[in-house]
Every structure is written in structure tokens, then in C-alpha cells.
Image: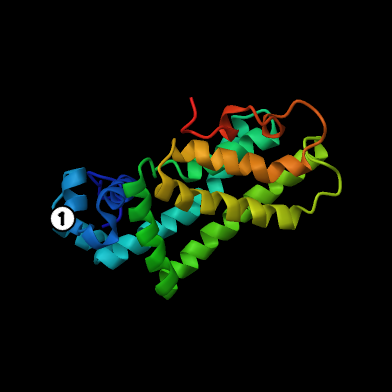
Amino acid sequence: MAGRPRGVEDAAILRATAEVMGRVGPAGLTLAAVARKVGLVPGTLVQRFGSKRGLLLALAERSVQEADTLPQRVRERHGSALDALAALVAESMAPMTTPERFANHLAFLCLDLTDPELHRHALAVHRAQGRAIGALLAEAVTTGELRPGTDLAALTGSVQAATAGAGLAWALERHGTLAQRVRRELDTVLAPHLTPGPHPAADPTHPHHRNPEEP
């Protein structure tokens, strides 16, 4: 009923859903597990979302909204476009703190690839991230961080491919943290396009370029 107060807002339920997803994956996720996480009964989730699938669709829709709003929040906290880009990539993967959590979120992505409705939302997230990356790269050219004439479309695709692949490599190799591995791959992709100057990405001794197994 309109105007009726809700004890737990939908946003809190969806945050809990993402947390449970990270722990047990989409196969292990149940309305009961999410309800316990937020202190509700499963019937309340059925009333709001209809089913487990409805809850997953709502989570996917929320991911699209976050992909649209995160870039501006990140940009406001960082002085340079490339610093903001590094933070954006890191924050997009922040929930995947362990290889197991990465695997569980990857399993959700596998659902996205086979379910038409989920795929629509996943593609929207991917495109929103691409727009944000492209805009930050374009700003970096304008401010002189990147070389004039940089092929921004190609570099945007390379950044997305490298950072996505970094997650899988990290989950397999299990060296260091995901944030370290993603930053190292990002720096490697950007290095040939940097203008001359003291850039961390151009410095092979920078910690992000060091093998995590080395002292």
C-alpha cells in the first residue's frame, strides 16, 4: 500500500542479496538466506519481488543504476582522470575480495549470458562502464595525461578486456589481491599512451608492476 512504511528498504535487501551471492553463488542463494540476512521472513521477499528470479532481476537492475552513478562519485574524489579511472575499475570489483567470491559472482555472470532479461541488464552495465572509461580517457587526453591522437575507442575496449581478464587470472593464480592485479594490468595497458613524465604506470619498479611473490 502506498505510504505504508517498510521496515527494511529494497536497497538494503539488494545489498544483502549481493553479499549472500558472494558467499554462496546464485545456485546457493535462497530467499530464506537473504531474509535471514536482513531480519525478515521469506514471505516478505515474495511479496516484494515475487520469486528468487524476481530478486535476481531487481539486483541486476540495481547494478545498472550503480554503473550509471558510480563514475561521477569516483571522479569527484580524485584529482586526475587516470586516478579516477583506476579507482573506478577497483570499485567495480570491490565485492570480490577472495577467489571464492569472484567465482560466485562469475557464476552469476554465466546466468547473465544465458538468460535474455539478465543479459539485457548485464550488457547495460558493460556499456555504462565503457562510456565512463571512455570519458575518463578522453579527459586524460585533454589534460595531457595521455598522448594526443590516442585511439580512445580501442583503448577503452582494451581497458575493459584487460581488467576483466585480470580478475580471472588472479582467481587462478591467487597472488596478491584482486585490486593489485587489476591495477597492474590497467597500468600496463595505459603505459604506451602516457605522455612523457613521472607516471607510476611507466615506472617498472612501481609496486603494481611487481610480482606479488617477490619480496
Rendered location of residue 46, percent (x, y) = 20, 62
Which residue is farthest front?
214
Determine the residue positioned at 35% across, 42% down. Answer: 98
Quick one: 177 or 33, which is closer to the camera?
Answer: 177
Amino acid on which disc 1 is placed: Ala
What's the colour scheme?
rainbow
Judged from the image, the secondary structure of the residue bearing numbered disc 1 is helix
Instruction: Kindly indicate the quadrant of the structure image that contains residue 103.
Output: bottom left
Determine the residue positioned at 44% across, 41% down. Answer: 94
Using residue 196 as the reference point, say whether residue 84 is left or right of it: left
Rendered location of residue 90, percent (x, y) = 51, 40
Q: Which residue is mark 1?
A: 32
Rendered location of residue 130, percent (x, y) = 62, 55
Instruction: Kindly indicate the quadrant of the structure image that contains residue 195.
Output: top right
Whether residue 63 is visible: yes
- Indicate the quadrant containing the N terminus: top left, top right, bottom left or bottom right: bottom left
So how many labels did they put on this image?
1
Quick one: 174 or 105, which is closer to the camera?
Answer: 174
**Image position of 98 with respect to 212: above or below:** below
Using residue 114 as the reference point, say whether residue 5 is left or right of it: left
Determine the residue positioned at 20% across, 58% down. Answer: 31
Quick one: 80 or 73, which is closer to the camera?
Answer: 80
Instruction: Kindly indicate the quadrant of the structure image that contains residue 194.
Output: top right
Q: Residues within 10 Å of mark 1 (few under 14, many from 20)?
A: some
Rendered location of residue 53, percent (x, y) = 29, 67
**Image position of 3 with respect to 180: above or below:** below
